[in-house]
Image (tube, grey):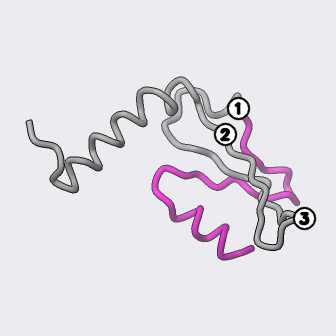
Amino acid sequence: MQDVRETLASAPGVVLEDDPSQQVYPQAIECVDQKETFVGRIRKDLDIENGLHLWVVSDNLLKGAAWNSVQIAETLHEMDLLHI
């Protein structure tokens, strides 16, 4: 489980908030106007051998619509697939 936390913590655009002992986990109210996606409450799925449960929170209006378009365009540019 630690490798999952490390991978998420180092992923671009992801903020890991997962400390059950201190009741730290992402909350929608704290994600307003934030471009990042917040992840926490990481738990092993008890029914699926390699499964996980994650709590994923973001500002859906910002991240889901506008910011995804910007990130797609940046990636296309970095891959030299965008020619204007």
The disc, 1 or 2, on the residue closer to the chain's N-terminal end is 1
- The structure residue drawn at horizontal position 74% and vertical position 73%, both measured from the top left corner, is 1
**Disc 2/disc 3 C-alpha distance (Å):** 24 Å
Mark nearer the viewer, 2 or 3 = 3
The residue that label 1 is drawn on is 28
The kind of residue tagged 2 is: Val
The kind of residue tagged 1 is: Ala
The residue that label 2 is drawn on is 57
Residue 52 in the image: state x and y as whole percent: 77, 62
How many residues crowd mark 3 within 10 Å: few (<14), some (14–19), many (20+)?
Answer: few
The disc, 3 or 1, on the residue closer to the chain's N-terminal end is 1
The kind of residue tagged 3 is: Asp
Q: Is 69 on the left-hand or right-hand side of 22?
A: left
SS for tag 2?
Answer: strand
**Disc 1/disc 2 C-alpha distance (Å):** 6 Å
Q: Is 17 on the left-hand or right-hand side of 22?
A: left
Contact, mark 3 vs mark 1 (Cβ under 8 Å): no
Res 44 → quadrant: bottom right
Question: Which residues fall within the magenta stretch?
Answer: 1-27
The disc, 2 or 3, on the residue closer to the chain's N-terminal end is 3
